[in-house]
Amino acid sequence: MEIFLIVLIGAVVIAAVIYGRLLERQRRDAMAALAARLGLRFSEERDHAAAERLGFLRKLDTGSNRYLYNRLDGDYQGHEVMASDYHYETYSHSKRGRRTQHHHLSVLTLRLPRSFPELLITPEGLFSKIAQAFGYDDIDFESAEFSRAFCVRSRDKKFAYDVCHPRMMEYLLAHRDLAIEFEGNVLALAFDTRLEVSQIEGRLQQLVELRRFLPDYLFTKS
C-alpha cells in the first residue's frame, strides 16, 4: 500500500509538471500570435539585462533572479511599447532549509520623449496606509473621491498635479485597478499577477490613452 501511494504521488507530480509546461507553451504561442497580429516583435527568451534596466521601477525592484520573458515590443499606435511577463524569486527559511518562491506578473511600458521625476499612482489600500504612517506622504487633490481611491506619491508635487488633472482623475476613477509609475522616460503599468493573453491588447490601449491624457506642455517646456 505504501509503495502504491508513493507511485501515485509521483504520477500526480509528473502529470502536474507536464500540464504546467503545456499551459506555458499555449501562453507562449498565444503571445507570439498576438505580437504578429499587432506588428510587434516577440521573444520567449529570459532577458535578465532588460529586467535590470527596468529595476528603477518600484514594482520591479524586489527579489532575485529577475527576468523578462514572453516579451512583445515595438511600435504600437505611434508609441514605443513593451508588454512582458516578469519573474522574480524570494526566499524563506525553515528547519528543512531554504525554500524558493517564484513570482510572476505582467509589466507594460511606454517610452516617453523626455524624462520626468518619479511618480507613483496606485489604488489606495492597506499597504499605502501603512506607508503613510511611516512618513511616505500621499499627495491630496481637490477631488476627495480621487484622493480616497488612489495613493499618489512624488517628490515633485507640481508634476503630480500636472499629470492628475481633472480628465486624468476621471479616467482613473473609471479604471481603479491601474497602478501607474513614471520615472525617467518610462510610463509603466505593473500588475500583481500575469495578465491573461486576451487582456494584453486592452492594457496596451490603456497605456496609450494615459499617454494621450498627459498635457502637451509637459513635452515642450524646458
Image (cartoon, grey):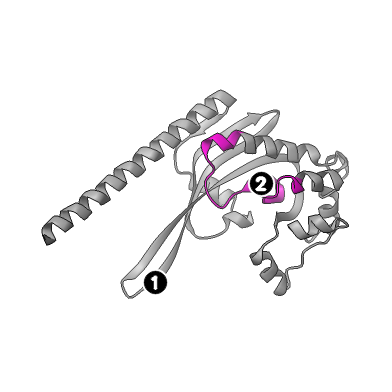
Q: What label sits on residue 181 in the rendered view?
A: none
Q: Secondary structure at mark 1?
A: strand
- What amino acid does circle 2 point to? Ala
Which residue was labeled with disc 1? Answer: 93
Q: Nearer the viewer, residue 57 or 133?
A: 133
Q: Position of residue 101 (x, y in %)?
A: 42, 60
Left or right placement of residue 155 versus residue 22 in this view = right
Up/down of 68 relative to 5, above or below: above
**What's the mark number on residue 188?**
2
Q: Which residues are magenta?
A: 172-201
- The quarter of the picture where the N terminus appears is bottom left
C-alpha distance separating marks 1 and 2: 33 Å
- How many other residues sit within 10 Å of disc 1, few (<14), some (14-19) or many (≥20)? few
At x 31%, y 46%, the residue is: 17
The residue shown at (48%, 35%) is 43
Q: In front: 168, or 212? A: 168
